[in-house]
């Protein structure tokens, strides 16, 4: 059971009573009913790639892990309705491939896509690398099938684009991290496949310049800006140190960089996208920049961004943050958070990067180069996170923009959430799960 008992980051080590691996919705319902009859708590688990311990049982030996991995069938791809219906255990990359096989795009994308599963993506309302254009997992869900805490099945597996019949119940389960029921299948939105793309890597003078670049670019090509990722020189330096085969292709003396991707569908083509970038270059908004000329170069540019988490791990790990503020406040947040951290931990190393276009950055803090990383985190992680979260909160931001709450950030939810909202969440939890058996100790 070891693989199901430990979380991705190795922060939580649970002791499950057992692991159930049902292969159908009715088997999931049977497991839930049996657990209810015996007062056994259930911890739903997808690909187990979460960062907040949301899918890890406690160490009491009384919680059952309910793995969705055998619900791994693609049920339907409908290019006319532009929908994809999959069971919860289908991996994100298998869902993408099922769409591509019918010449369509399922746009959710993230580093963990070969392991993470659709059920987990929805349960955590996952974000990733193309939120700017296509939204979070929540925005891509049209219908859900859910096993409720009492063992009944809520069958709302429909692909309707318009449906105003009362409460939108599926939204309750998206982002609930398995605390209100178990998502067993979903009908998701598809998009026309991308026919041309331009990927560029550019130096920018500062975060405010990155913000202007994004605004101007969107003014020119609108939603065709698919990704807009920010990286500090320090984050890049971690990557090139951990992966010496990777190289920064532009002004190496710059402190700030942007990886941006624009994509077109239909006949629009690459030329329009390149022309927009050329224009911004003439206007001085793009600094020293490169444009990928082929898929190999595109992959190399993306590797610089996607491998930051692996580089952090490689160099001893980091105190991770996943904050968001409104786009216009990002530059202020970055400045204030960096000031707050360096004032108290002048030798700590910052690894700052992320989904700039979504107002979401990972403001990660590494131990000083000569310190023991594990010991540093044990002693300082809580105080460091307090500083970072306070900076986000002061700007009306969120302490968890994409990784969810789980057990890691449960107390933060209680601290930072409006009391009325928190009370409403607890009311919903009690109403749907009066015995408190669905993923207890997570979120609330
Ligand atoms: C990413 O954007 C992920 O790469 C992981 O959300 C961020 O490891 C992190 O801090
Ligand atoms: Zn991220």
Image (cartoon, rainbow, N blue to C red):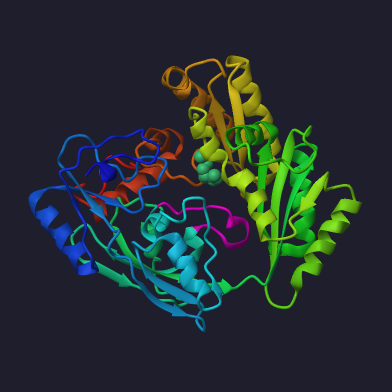
Residue 174 position in % (x across, y down): 40, 57
Residue lying at 46% horizontally and 62% vertically, measured from the top left: 93
What secondary structure do most residues of the magenta stretch adopt?
A: loop
Is residue 381 positioned above or below 409 on the image?
above
Magenta stretch: give its range.
Answer: 124-136
Task: Name which residue lies at 65% across and 42% down.
Answer: 246
Residue 359 in view (yes/no): no
| Image side of residue 387 versus residue 410, left or right | right
Q: Which of 171 and 335 is in front in this view?
A: 335
At 65% across and 34% down in the image, what residue appears? 333
Q: Is residue 18 left or right of residue 254?
A: left
Residue 87: image quadrant is: bottom left
Q: Please, is residue 161 above or below residue 425 in the view?
A: below
Q: In this view, does 438 lie above or below 220?
A: above
Whether residue 23 is in magenta: the answer is no
- Residue 152 falls in which quadrant of the image? bottom left
């Amino acid at each position: 059971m070891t693989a199901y008992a430990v979380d991705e980051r190795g922060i939580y080590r649970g002791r499950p009573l057992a692991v159930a691996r049902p292969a159908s919705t009715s088997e999931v319902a049977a497991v839930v009913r049996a657990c209810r009859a015996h007062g056994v708590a259930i911890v739903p688990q997808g690909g187990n790639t979460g960062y907040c311990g949301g899918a890890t049982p406690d160490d009491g030996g009384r919680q059952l892990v309910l793995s969705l991995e055998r619900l791994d069938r693609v049920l339907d791809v409908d290019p006319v309705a532009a929908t994809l219906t999959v069971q919860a255990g289908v991996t994100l990359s298998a869902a993408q491939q099922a769409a591509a096989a019918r010449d369509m795009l399922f746009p959710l994308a993230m580093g963990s896509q070969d392991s993470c599963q659709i059920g987990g993506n929805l349960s955590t309302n996952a974000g990733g690398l193309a939120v700017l254009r296509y939204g979070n997992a929540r925005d891509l869900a049209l219908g859900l099938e859910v096993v409720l805490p009492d063992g009944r099945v809520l069958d709302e597996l429909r692909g309707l684009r318009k449906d105003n019949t009362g409460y939108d119940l599926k939204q309750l389960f998206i982002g609930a991290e398995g605390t209100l029921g178990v998502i067993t299948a979903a009908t998701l939105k598809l998009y026309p496949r991308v026919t041309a793309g331009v990927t560029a890597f550019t130096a920018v003078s500062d975060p405010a310049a990155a913000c202007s670049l994004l605004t101007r670019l969107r003014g020119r090509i609108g939603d065709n800006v698919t990704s807009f990722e920010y990286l500090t020189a320090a984050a890049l330096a971690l990557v090139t140190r951990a992966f010496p085969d990777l190289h920064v292709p532009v002004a190496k003396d710059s402190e700030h960089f942007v990886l941006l991707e624009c994509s077109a569908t239909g006949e629009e083509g690459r030329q329009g996208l390149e022309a927009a970038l050329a224009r911004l270059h003439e206007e001085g908004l793009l600094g020293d920049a490169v444009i990928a000329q082929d898929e190999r170069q595109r992959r190399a540019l993306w590797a610089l961004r996607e491998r930051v988490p692996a580089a952090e791990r490689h160099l001893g790990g980091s105190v991770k943050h996943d904050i968001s503020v409104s786009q216009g406040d990002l530059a202020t947040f970055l400045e204030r958070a960096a000031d707050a951290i360096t004032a108290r931990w002048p030798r700590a190393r910052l690894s700052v990067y992320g989904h700039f276009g979504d107002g979401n950055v990972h403001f990660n803090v590494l131990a000083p180069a000569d310190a023991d990383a594990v010991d540093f985190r044990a002693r300082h992680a809580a105080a460091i996170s307090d500083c970072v979260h306070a900076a986000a909160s002061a700007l009306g931001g969120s302490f968890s923009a994409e990784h969810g709450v789980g057990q890691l950030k449960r107390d933060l939810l209680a601290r930072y959430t409006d009391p009325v909202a928190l009370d409403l969440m607890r009311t919903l939890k009690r109403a749907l799960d009066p015995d408190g058996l669905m993923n207890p100790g997570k979120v609330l």
